Image: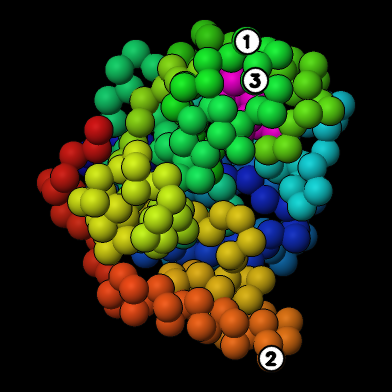
Amino acid sequence: MAGRFVDVAFSIDENFAKQGAVVLASLAAVADPDSHYRVHLLGDDLTPSTRRELRRIAEDAGIELRLVEVDDKAIRALPELSGKTRPAYFRLLLPEILDGVADRVLYVDADTVFCADPAELIDVELHGRAFAAVRSGWSPWLCCEGGPPNWRELGLDPRAPYFNSGVLVMDVAAWREENLSERSFAFLSDNRDTMTLMDQQALNSVVQGEWAELPPRWNQQEYVFSPTGLARVIWTEEEVREAIDEPGIIHYLGLHKPWMSAGNHPQSQRWFDALDTTKWVGWRPEERSPAAAAYNRLVVAWRVIRHGSIKGRSKAPSRHGRPVR
């Protein structure tokens, strides 16, 4: 891997400045010094102060940071979703932005934290597909609640495996050849009144299961902490335990995000550990109320009692450890 570029991308606006800093800082903490990391940050209206901090984090770790100004004319007419911002669509613009720049890129949502060196993901076997992802632990089939609600009318396969789009390993050329972005934009425009998860539903509907699957440790979703639910059906107990004990990337999806309430996720501390290496050291969210804080602590305590201790910061696993599927 020495001398090889490892391309990583994520997108933020100023409202997600802290989260972007955590993504970059956590990557810096686990990156292999023998690899050359190149981070493509698709920013939207970032302040000079935020840009300086992101550059500092990257420079201190020897990471090349490319701040990309996005021409978002392709998404201006797309439907908006409450709680999501324009950068949520930026992943669909990546293959065009990186054409001729990178062969493969690892895209991550800004509500993630790196816990292990992700360099091995760049070489993952795609089996002829344009990208790899982790299955959704909440909605593992296209017909489930997180899928497009009008799948019957669209004639989609209800049994098609459904992925979470928060972590994607993209083959840039294959993605472009299959016109996945253009097809997703068209799907969103045609179904704007029925979509709730927007780009994730669009991509899943366009490919209908034609994607390569990664182990759940590379997109640890909170569903692995539940003793019941579909996560226990689609993944083996070994895969679930590995995702809990040795996550490669933690994804704070849904409402259980550390910056919303410090104790509402069993692995919130990993996010704060990374935050405390940035200019936002010591920042913590205000609890919404004493009752909410107590409830959150009870939820975490129950999970620890039910599933065993939740490990804190862990060392990155060996690069020669378990291969990525």
Decide which of 59, 150 is in the foreground and name it.
Answer: 150
Indicate the amino acid at tag 2.
Answer: Pro
User: Mark 3 falls on what kind of element?
Assistant: helix
Tell me how far mark 1 sits from mark 3, CA to CA. 6 Å
Q: Farthest residue to the front: give it.
A: 228
**Residue at the image point whose x is 62% and y is 10% from the top:** 155
Decide which of 231, 243 is in the foreground and name it.
Answer: 231
User: Mark 2 falls on what kind of element?
Assistant: helix
Residue 112 at x, y percent in the picture: 51, 56
Indicate the amino acid at tag 1.
Answer: Gly
Identify the disc placed on residue 151: 3
On the rendered structure, is 25 left or right of 291? left
On the rendered structure, is 279 left or right of 320? right
Residue 80 at x, y percent in the picture: 83, 38
| Quarter that holds the C terminus | top left
User: Mark 1 falls on what kind of element?
Assistant: loop
Residue 188, placed above or below residue 17 = above
Identify the disc placed on residue 155: 1
Q: Earlier along the polypeptide chain: callout 2 or callout 1?
A: 1
Q: In terms of image quadrants, where is residue 75?
A: top right
Q: Which residue is mark 2?
A: 290
Q: Is residue 208 visible?
A: yes
Magenta range: 198-206
Residue 4 at x, y percent in the picture: 30, 36
How many labels were placed on the picture? Answer: 3
Do callouts 2 and 1 mark residues in contact (Cβ within 8 Å)? no
